[in-house]
């Protein structure tokens, strides 16, 4: 098999399996209570905050500096604001008031998909340097993507989306990793400034969605401390994942 094709396939599989498994995990709970879903959404919000603040942005700062990273963050927020403008408040009576959760899941999926592209660049560049480095990065990133799949699937589940569609959407969010792996292997050496912008752009998008969509909704689902406890637990888990992987 052509080397470029093999690296691209590995990128696609790792991205799609990683986020897809995260979405699948969310479906194991058959009849979730509102309190449980508040904890889950709080937990996933915490994961996203930790991933952005302790993983994406520090790496962006290292590669391109703070000013360029801030530019990328602003661009990510602006992109989500533009996308949000074209998403209707409701698509049909089928989802009724729960469509707000569907909207959050869609926006978060966009942010995760953007995030997966520079991860794919890292995998492709790793393979260009050394096969063991590339494979190791691919495995680590696939594991890293699982909590992101959970974060995307939880609000979709609350919005009443069909289980098979939830898994499909989380799998689709991993596709850009394959595209990034293709470009990374093809070019070998990617501009550090370009990767910095990609990472910070994704970070800005995910921060806006988490702070503007997910966190407020956790308080609306269930009034109490459980969502906050879940969020803190998610931040702690996200820090652990970022430090270990």
Image (tube, rainbow, N blue to C red):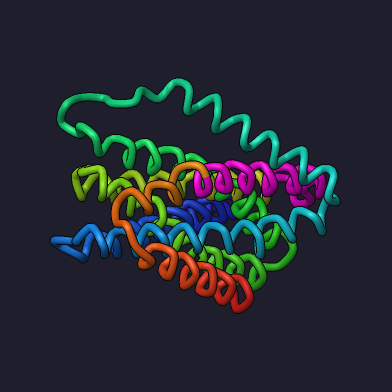
Report whether 212 appears left or right of 181.
left
Q: How far from the left and from the top, in percent, is residue 151?
A: 41, 56
Please name the residue shown 57% across and 55% down the image: 7
The image shows residue 208, relative to residue 96, as above or below, that is below
Helix, strand or loop: magenta stretch: helix
Please name the residue shown 25% across and 39% down the image: 98
Quarter location, residue 141: bottom right
Q: How far from the left and from the top, in percent, is residue 205?
A: 58, 41
Is residue 200 visible in the rendered structure shown here?
Answer: yes
Q: Magenta span has 144?
A: no
The image shows residue 132, relative to residue 30, as above or below, that is below
Quarter location, residue 128: bottom right
Please name the residue shown 40% across and 25% down the image: 87
Q: Give the range drawn in magenta.
A: 186-211
The image shows residue 148, relative to residue 164, as above or below, that is below
Q: Magenta span has 206?
A: yes
What is the count of numbered marks?
0
**What is the residue that sits farthest to the front in this orientation?**
224
The image shows residue 191, relative to residue 7, as above or below, that is above
The foreground one among 9 and 54 is 54
The foreground one among 2 and 11 is 11
Q: Quadrant of the C terminus?
A: bottom right
Please name the residue shown 46% across and 65% down the image: 231
Q: How far from the left and from the top, in percent, is residue 76?
A: 63, 37
Q: How far from the left and from the top, in percent, is residue 215?
A: 45, 51
Is residue 18 visible in the rendered structure shown here?
Answer: no
């Amino acid at each position: 098999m052509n080397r470029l094709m093999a690296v691209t396939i590995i990128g696609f599989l790792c991205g799609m399996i990683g986020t897809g498994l995260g979405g699948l995990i969310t479906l194991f709970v058959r009849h979730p209570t509102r309190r449980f879903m508040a904890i889950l959404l709080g937990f996933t919000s915490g994961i996203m905050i930790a991933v952005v603040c302790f993983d994406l942005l520090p790496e962006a700062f290292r590669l391109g500096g703070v000013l360029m990273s801030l530019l990328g963050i602003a661009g990510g927020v602006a992109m989500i604001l533009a996308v949000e403008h074209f998403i209707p408040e409701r698509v049909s009576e089928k989802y009724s008031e729960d469509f707000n959760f569907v909207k959050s899941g869609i926006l978060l999926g966009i942010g995760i998909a953007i995030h997966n592209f520079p991860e794919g660049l890292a995998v492709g560049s790793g393979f260009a340097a050394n096969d063991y480095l590339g494979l190791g990065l691919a495995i680590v990133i696939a594991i890293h993507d699982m909590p992101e799949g959970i974060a995307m699937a939880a609000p979709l589940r609350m919005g009443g989306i069909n289980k098979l569609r939830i898994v499909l959407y989380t799998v689709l969010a991993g596709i850009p990793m394959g595209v990034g792996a293709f470009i990374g292997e093809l070019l070998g050496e990617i501009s550090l400034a370009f990767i910095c912008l990609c990472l910070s752009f994704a970070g800005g998008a995910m921060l806006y969605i988490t702070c503007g969509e997910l966190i407020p909704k956790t308080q609306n689902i269930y009034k109490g401390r459980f969502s906050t406890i879940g969020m803190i637990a998610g931040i702690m888990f996200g820090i652990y994942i970022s430090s270990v992987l």
